[in-house]
Image (cartoon, helix red, strand yellow):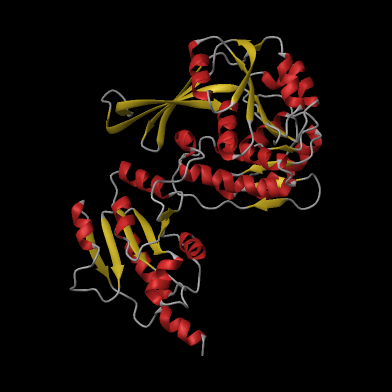
């Protein structure tokens, strides 16, 4: 049996108050949020532990200060059955972060609870679980846990590689840390506080800060996370490695850093080298955000959906939710898109102009073979999806396994279904489905003289 992944740090209670807003209050230019639903989830180190438990095969142990107030009790209930909790007695109140949200957007955040936890004696179990750990993630949220001498002493005896996710108001990482994972603003804040004079926000400045922080902390490596730009990994000398992120449309970025650090710690515990761990962590964080981020924490580790014949790009649900929350128009189109050519591009660009997002539905490889013959597709569904997603006017891609997109259309329920080609004057096969939810099927002009079949034929001459 693999040794556990141990998460050490500050456990918070996160609360989302999610509602709708259609008007401003008359006494100030702020929205009136109504029909509010309260959603609670673990936050801080507790969220990192839940993510790690849902996305790895290891047992996850959370070592965190826990008070005896109502917030702590609610947090214990959220963690029950997901991670093993080893409590450090604490006082000062459970930190609670409340976000008021309308659709995918936060209106305001309200924080409560003591700014610093007062720790009691360290239970002997803490040293035991750290000593038997396959890997350790320290999630510092600036509440004093990682500054405590007995906690730092216990970390010195950790049995696996340590990943340290720092906080500008937190303690310095222990020198044994294999990898430290600040985001760009955290790296800048820590560097400035330490008197490390590096200016600018470009990659050169990020790399210089990472090198300076390695020397300042005496740690093995620093990976500065850069949101949609990915992460920059430095070992303190030589050229840094830049790991680009997969583009994600929509989603909730809250918790992305926890997801990155949890994935890096799990991969290092599995024996990955640091570069491999950072590359895997970038991919894991992008998938986490695309799936819905911290707002979708309860579904982590579950299949993406209950429709096995529809393989969806993870961000499609977030795209649909964002556009519909804003009262926008969802446009969809479909086809094989094997060997993308100017005719496809013209149709896709025109389709995107009909609304506020474009979802492209593409046939799976088996579906293309049934429609086009055994020599097709030339390009696999995964690669066709990647090419389409790279187009600036495509917001999401789904792959369907049937011969027609009827099932995926019933799931997406677009306002407009656009097809290019020689359908003018004819009723599109999908039109009847669109009528069921008040959608409209339309035909777009096709750029003449371009076809995948002709391209394939010419390539074989």
- 423 over 232 or under it: above or below: below
* Residue at x-position 59% and y-position 32%: 48
Identify which residue is drawn at 36% across, 37% down: 103
441, above or below 459, in the image: above
* Position of residue 325 in the picture relative to residue 115 (left or right): left
Along the viewing direction, whichever of 86 and 104 lies nearer the viewer: 86
Q: Quadrant of residue 270?
A: top right
Q: Position of residue 461 (x, y in %)?
A: 51, 90
Q: Nearer the viewer, residue 67 or 402?
A: 402
Q: Position of residue 347 (x, y in %)?
A: 35, 69
**Quadrant in which the N terminus is drawn:** top right
Q: What's the residue at 44%, 67% (across, down)?
A: 366
The location of residue 454, given as percent across then percent down, is 42, 84
Return the residue nearer the eye: 324 or 115: 324
Q: How many marks?
A: 0
Q: Nearer the viewer, residue 390 or 73?
A: 73
Residue at the far front in the pictured view: 1
Residue at image x 49%, y 38%? 293
Answer left or right for 224 relative to 50. right
Which image quadrant for residue 130?
Answer: top right
> Residue 303's spot in the image, x, y percent?
47, 44
* Residue 395 in sight from this viewpoint: no
Q: Is residue 455 left or right of residue 145?
A: left
Q: Is residue 458 visible?
A: yes
Relative height, residue 437 to residue 32 (above, below) = below
């Amino acid at each position: 049996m693999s040794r556990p992944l141990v998460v050490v740090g500050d456990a918070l209670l996160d609360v989302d108050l999610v509602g709708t807003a259609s008007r401003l209050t008359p006494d100030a230019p702020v929205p009136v949020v109504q029909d509010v639903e309260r959603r609670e989830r673990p936050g801080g180190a507790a969220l990192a532990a839940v993510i790690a438990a849902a996305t790895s095969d290891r047992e996850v142990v959370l070592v965190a200060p826990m008070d005896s107030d109502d917030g702590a009790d609610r947090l214990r209930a959220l963690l029950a059955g997901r991670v093993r909790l080893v409590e450090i007695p604490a006082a000062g109140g459970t930190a609670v972060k409340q976000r008021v949200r309308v659709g995918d957007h936060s209106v305001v955040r309200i924080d409560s609870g003591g700014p610093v936890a007062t720790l009691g004696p360290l239970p002997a179990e803490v040293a035991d679980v750290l000593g038997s750990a396959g890997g350790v993630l320290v999630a510092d949220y600036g509440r004093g846990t990682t500054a405590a001498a007995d906690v730092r002493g216990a970390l010195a005896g950790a049995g696996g590689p340590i990943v340290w996710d720092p906080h500008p108001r937190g303690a310095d990482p222990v020198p044994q840390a294999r990898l430290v994972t600040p985001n760009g603003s955290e790296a800048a804040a820590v560097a400035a506080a330490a008197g490390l004079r590096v200016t600018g926000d470009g990659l050169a400045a990020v790399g210089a800060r990472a090198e300076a922080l390695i020397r300042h902390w005496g740690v093995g490596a620093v990976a500065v996370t850069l949101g949609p730009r990915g992460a920059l990994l430095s070992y303190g000398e030589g050229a840094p490695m830049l790991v680009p992120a997969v583009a994600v449309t929509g989603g909730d970025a809250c918790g992305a850093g926890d997801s990155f650090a949890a994935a890096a710690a799990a991969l290092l515990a599995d024996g990955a080298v640091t570069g491999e761990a950072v590359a895997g962590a970038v991919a894991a964080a992008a998938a986490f955000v695309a799936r819905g981020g911290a707002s979708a924490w309860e579904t982590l580790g579950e299949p993406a959906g209950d429709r096995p014949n529809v393989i969806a790009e993870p961000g499609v649900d977030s795209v649909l939710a964002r556009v519909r929350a804003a009262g926008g128009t969802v446009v969809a189109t479909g086809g094989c898109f094997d060997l993308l050519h100017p005719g496809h591009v013209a149709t896709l660009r025109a389709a995107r102009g009909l609304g506020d997002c474009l979802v492209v539905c593409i046939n799976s490889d088996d579906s293309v073979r049934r429609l086009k013959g055994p020599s097709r597709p030339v390009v696999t569904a995964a690669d066709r999806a990647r090419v389409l997603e790279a187009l600036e006017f495509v917001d999401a891609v789904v792959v369907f396994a049937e011969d027609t997109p009827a099932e995926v259309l019933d799931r997406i329920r677009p306002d407009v279904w656009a097809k290019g080609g020689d359908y003018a004057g004819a009723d599109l096969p999908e039109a009847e489905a669109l009528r069921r939810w008040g959608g409209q099927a339309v035909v777009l002009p096709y750029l003449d003289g371009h076809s995948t079949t002709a391209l394939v034929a010419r390539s074989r001459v």
